[in-house]
Image (tube, rainbow, N blue to C red):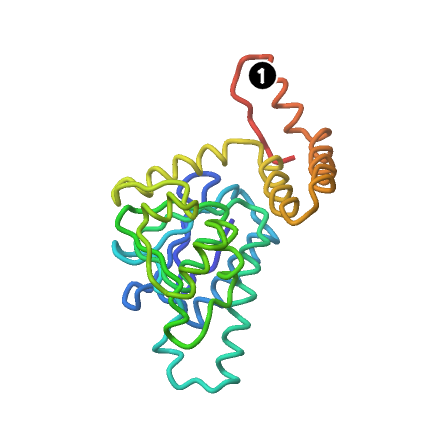
Amino acid sequence: MTLPAYETLKTEMVEPHVLVVTLNRPQAANAINTQMGLDYLDLWTRLTDAPGDVRCVVLTGSGEKIFCAGGDLKERNGMTREQWVHQHQIFERQYWALVDLYLPVIAAVNGHAYGGGFETVLSCDFAYAANTARFALPEVTLGIMPGTGGTQNLPRAIGERRAKEMIMTGKPISAQQAHEWGALNGVFEPSELLPKVLEIARTIAGNAPLSVRQIKKSVRFGMQMELKTAYRFEVEAYNHLVETEDRYEGVRAFNEKRKPVFKGR
């Protein structure tokens, strides 16, 4: 697919079905300003409407020390209440667009992820980080609180008590601790991070794309349901795959002892 040349994001199809998105404001610690919010919103909306060949997205940051410092406080300095609320509504819409995207999104956290940067990581399907990265939701030290999913996604990832401690103190934790607590799927040396994540993305992109989408839907919505209802929701998601070309191809390839060629149909 062809994407616009965004002002704050770099996009690159590194493989036939894997899109790498890089936060590209290194001079501002990749902080989220209004333009980045608009760029994010446009990107996630386009990928929802017409993903083309994209089957998996990897989200990372430019530079070696910081993934994303959160909201751009320099831009916010002096904002009126109306300006602040307007900007935050843009941020809310882009975060929800990311969460609603049916393609899998993997965070490759190359450095520190604070505030909205950490909330972005928590909004991805799963995440890996460089062992030098640190994570925090420090909004309480600025007179505000997390406002794009942090108070909901963090306790779901690491548990209520740990999340309340992190959010109420504003103190950071290391990548190793984030991994031990369940906020990360793995931790790598900085030079190994992107190659390792791309290997995982390649594996996902090589699987049946309709199956991957149905799995994401089943996990996300099923986790919000009473268990017996979630079981039925899973079966409905499963039944949508029975008559797909990819399901026939998968069974054929297994019996012919070859690698399946999935087409997303």
Is residue 184 left or right of 123 when viewed as pictured?
Answer: left
Quadrant where the C terminus sits is top right
What kind of residue is marked 1? Phe
Residue shown at the point (60%, 13%) measured from the top left? 255
Q: Is residue 3 above or below residue 37?
A: above
Name of the residue lying farthest toward the top: 256
Q: Quadrant of residue 61?
A: bottom left
Q: Name the one closer to the observer, 147 or 172.
A: 172
Where does label 1 land, which residue?
254
Q: Is residue 253 left or right of residue 127?
A: right
Viewed as shown, does residue 185 lie left or right of 192? right
SS for dot 1: helix
Query: Residue 108: image x %, image y %?
Result: 37, 47
Q: Residue 256, how many percent across, how many down? A: 58, 12
Q: Quadrant of residue 185?
A: top left
Q: Which residue does the image show at 63% across and 19% down from the upper left?
A: 251
The image shows a total of numbered marks equal to 1
Front residue (pair 194, 16): 194
**Residue visible at 30% across and 58% down in the picture:** 66
Q: Examine the rendered structure and indicate whether residue 155 appears above or below residue 85.
A: above
Q: Give the left or right position of residue 155, taking residue 22 as reference.
A: right
